[in-house]
């Protein structure tokens, strides 16, 4: 009987345990969600007080819970919060990785509000690295998403960040407009932290716009709000800005007082950070941050100290001078006055020079930005003009239409040449042209240039003659591309202005030291010649012999200016001799290093059919990422004609999703698009696909930007408008498995 009771007891115990387990599993998800939120809240509190190590620990534990309950939205937000903390402890690379993880999840689940927060933080990281254009693009994308999701209260933080970028770029009027938006929204939604910061930054802008009284009032108002709400970072920033405003007003005592408060509070904040980070592996980064910060602060306090000391010394000396001047003669008094005036004049002159230098630098930067913008805006429609013209010429036009289409093609090519010439002049003037020395055969190079221009000479019934000095070595080390460009320009110029005549090309040695040769090149013609009055101006930009010559022969007037710039880069010189009606001779001299003979590879001309037509293109898929509808149509038409299948998307985000969903062989990625740029889209794709071939299909041409394309993960660049043969060559290399060797990234 006791045994039966025992079995009944065991059965009831098991039954109760099972019931409790089932009830616990129902409540388990709710409990985990609650623990998840508690972890996130705890991390926020710790981050706000500078306890970043524990904040990261809580966020990592929160992420484990989010994974366990498969809460994708929380996973994305936690990655963003982790990135924010990593950024605060100066771990920007790790922060970028976390942000990329966040954005992938947020796009996957269409969490656009979370994605907007991620973009905002990405913008902040770019701005701290001085990448202001990228930062502004992210801020714009962030604002657009917040507006789309009807989350107006979050826009104030983005507009504040935009304003800080504009301040860094000294675009004060634009900064002022964004700060006004921030203040309106911050007041509406009672955002004291953002309101105080916007007012403080407004003070900085007003001071830069030389309204120090208004600046002081705005910064003081921001400081008061920050102090009332214990917003330590804003208080610290206010101290620094108010110190600068007082210094501009000449009130060195108050300036010194506020910079001193700023330094004391900065030390206090940094000490808290160091104590908290001592537990983790990020202490080294905060030490570096502290060193940089202290160096800046010490420089500021020394400046204020010096000015404050100068004020006190001036006062003492003024009293002493009253006594001294009564004992000195009138002549000494006059000498002191003369010396004082001289010093003032020197200071004034120095100030003028500094202002002039700043204006020149600003003008140079403005010019470069203008040319970059204009180039892109011109190349984009040119892509349409040349692309559509080539398509029409290939589609068997009527006989009477062919001359018109060829004229249109010529005009498009001429415009493209003109744009390229302007860009090259700009690069030469900005010292952005670099040498690329390599072994080459000089004699063969000159013969190739003459052969390439032979048809043009024949059209003018002009004979070309070549004289290469007997016994002169043929192989050298130098920048053969620039030498070719010089020869093409000078020889092309001679052909253009010589009809029914002769042109002589000569190369000979004028000096030698060991392996270094100084060579002189002559391009002589018996064409129309140049007047003595115009000869001194021939190497200036946009200069030609006369208005009549320009109308008759055309041209941009940039060729000789480019030639002179390239020769100077090669450490050479150029001059000319000419007589009107009898012809012109251009001489240029450059140093070249002789090297042993090289066996140049024999390049066999390959027919088009040996390229794309020899490949099996039936399974090849290409993705076009382009927001311009006409360019979409042209690129697709070209690819379709080549027998290639392609899909089209019109923005970077869609490109990322499409690459995830479909296996493509090649992606043609435009750079400037709404939302995230082609650069950023490529960076994201590279986080999950390292092998996909991605070409930048873009109108961007400035070489100083090319490193960004390489770092983003592009395989090569196809410039718009592109030449059909270049386009096919690069596609063939990608589709046939050849190694792509890009001249842009070398």
Image (cartoon, rainbow, N blue to C red):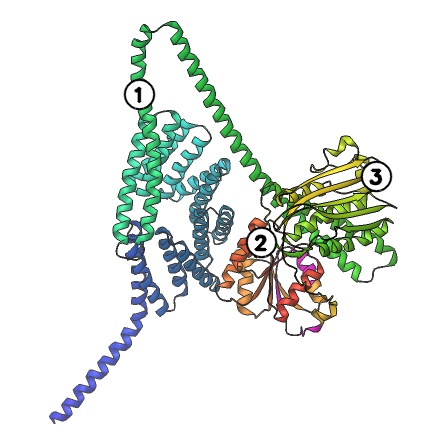
- Which image quarter holds the N terminus? bottom left
Question: What's the residue at 59%, 56% (across, down)?
Answer: 744
Q: Nearer the viewer, residue 397 or 567?
A: 567
Residue 531 in the figure: left or right of residue 114: right
Report how far apart the C-alphas of labels 2 and 1 lie in the structure: 60 Å
**Above or below for 516 versus 27:** above
**Which percent across, then down, holds residue 30?**
31, 67
Q: Is residue 329 above or below residue 471?
A: above
Callout in the foreground (2, 3): 3
Q: Magenta region: which residues?
A: 614-637
Q: Which residue is mark 2?
A: 673
The residue sitting at the left extreme is 2
Q: Residue sitting at 43 percent across and 52 percent down?
A: 121
Disc 1: which residue = 313
Q: Earlier in the sequence, mark 2 or mark 3?
A: 3
Q: Residue at x 70, y 73 (%)?
A: 614
Are circles 2 and 3 on residues that touch, CB within 8 Å?
A: no
Residue 264 in the image: x percent, y percent? 27, 38
**Label located before the other in sequence (2 or 1):** 1
Observer-side mark, 2 or 1, equals 1
Disc 3 or disc 1, which is closer to the eye?
Answer: 3
Label 2, secondary structure: give it: loop
Q: Is residue 632 magenta?
A: yes
Which residue is outermost to the bottom? 1
Q: CA distance from mark 2 to mark 3?
A: 50 Å
Whether residue 304 is situated above or below residue 63 in the rendered picture: above
> Which of the two labelled residues, at mark 3 and mark 1, occupies the earlier sequence position?
1
């Amino acid at each position: 009987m006791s045994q039966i009771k025992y079995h009944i007891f065991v059965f009831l115990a098991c039954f109760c345990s099972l019931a409790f387990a089932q009830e616990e599993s129902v409540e388990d998800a709710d409990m985990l969600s609650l623990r998840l939120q508690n972890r996130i809240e705890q991390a926020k509190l710790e981050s706000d007080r500078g306890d970043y190590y524990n904040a990261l620990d809580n966020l990592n534990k929160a992420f484990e819970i989010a994974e366990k309950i498969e809460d994708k939205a929380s996973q994305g937000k936690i990655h963003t919060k982790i990135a924010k903390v990593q950024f605060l402890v100066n771990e920007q690379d790790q922060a970028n990785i976390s942000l990329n993880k966040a954005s992938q999840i947020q796009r996957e689940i269409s969490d656009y509000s979370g994605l907007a927060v991620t973009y905002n933080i990405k913008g902040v990281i770019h701005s701290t690295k001085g990448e202001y254009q990228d930062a502004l693009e992210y801020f714009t994308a962030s604002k657009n998403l917040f507006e789309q999701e009807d989350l107006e209260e979050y826009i104030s933080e983005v507009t504040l960040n935009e304003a800080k970028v504009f301040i860094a770029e000294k675009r004060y009027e634009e900064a002022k407009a964004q700060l006004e938006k921030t203040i309106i929204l911050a007041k509406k939604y009672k955002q004291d932290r953002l309101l105080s910061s916007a007012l403080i930054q407004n003070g900085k802008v007003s001071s830069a716009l030389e309204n120090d009284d208004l600046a002081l009032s705005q910064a003081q108002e921001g400081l008061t709000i920050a102090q009332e709400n214990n917003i330590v970072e804003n208080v610290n920033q206010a101290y620094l800005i108010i110190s600068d405003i007082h210094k501009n007003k000449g009130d060195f005592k108050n300036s010194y007082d506020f910079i001193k408060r700023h330094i004391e509070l900065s030390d206090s904040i940094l000490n808290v950070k160091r104590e908290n980070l001592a537990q983790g592996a990020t202490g080294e980064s905060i030490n570096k941050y502290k060193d940089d910060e202290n160096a800046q602060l010490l420089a500021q306090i020394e400046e204020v100290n010096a000015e404050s000391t100068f004020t006190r010394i001036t006062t003492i000396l003024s009293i002493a001078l009253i006594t001294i001047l009564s004992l000195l003669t009138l002549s000494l008094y006059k000498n002191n006055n003369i010396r004082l005036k001289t010093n003032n004049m020197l200071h004034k002159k120095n100030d003028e020079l500094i202002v002039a230098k700043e204006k020149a630098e600003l003008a140079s930067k403005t010019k470069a930005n203008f040319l970059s913008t204009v180039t892109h805006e011109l190349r984009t429609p040119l892509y349409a003009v040349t692309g559509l013209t080539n398509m029409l010429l290939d589609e068997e036009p009527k006989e009477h239409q062919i001359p018109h289409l060829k004229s249109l093609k010529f005009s498009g090519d001429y415009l493209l040449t003109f744009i390229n010439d302007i860009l090259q002049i700009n690069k030469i003037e900005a010292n952005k042209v670099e040498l690329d020395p390599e072994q080459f055969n000089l004699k063969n190079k000159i013969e190739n240039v003459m052969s390439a221009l032979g048809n043009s000479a024949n059209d003018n019934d002009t004979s070309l003659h070549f004289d290469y000095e007997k016994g002169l070595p043929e192989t050298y080390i130098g920048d053969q591309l620039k030498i070719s460009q010089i020869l093409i320009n000078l020889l092309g110029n001679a052909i253009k202005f010589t009809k029914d005549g002769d042109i002589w090309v000569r190369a000979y040695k004028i000096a030698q030291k060991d392996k270094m040769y100084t060579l002189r090149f002559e391009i002589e013609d018996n064409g129309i010649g140049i007047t003595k009055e115009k000869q001194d101006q021939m190497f200036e930009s946009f200069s030609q012999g006369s208005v009549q010559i320009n109308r008759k022969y055309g041209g941009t007037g940039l060729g000789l200016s480019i030639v002179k710039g390239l020769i100077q880069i090669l450490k050479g010189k150029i001059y000319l001799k000419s007589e009107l009606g009898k012809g012109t001779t251009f001489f240029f001299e450059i140093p070249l290093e002789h090297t042993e003979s090289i066996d140049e590879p024999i390049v066999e001309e390959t027919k088009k059919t040996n390229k794309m037509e020899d490949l099996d293109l039936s399974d090849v898929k290409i993705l076009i990422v382009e927001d311009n509808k006409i360019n979409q149509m042209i690129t697709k038409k070209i690819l379709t004609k080549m027998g290639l299948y392609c899909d089209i998307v019109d923005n970077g985000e869609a490109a990322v999703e499409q690459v995830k969903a479909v296996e493509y062989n090649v992606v043609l990625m435009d750079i400037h698009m709404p939302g995230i740029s082609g650069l950023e889209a490529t960076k994201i794709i590279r986080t999950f696909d390292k092998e996909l071939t991605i070409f930048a299909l873009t109108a961007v041409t400035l070489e100083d930007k090319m490193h960004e394309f390489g770092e983003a993960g592009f395989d090569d660049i196809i410039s718009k408008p592109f030449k059909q043969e270049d386009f096919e060559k690069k596609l063939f290399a990608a589709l046939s498995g050849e190694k792509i060797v890009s001249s842009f990234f070398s």
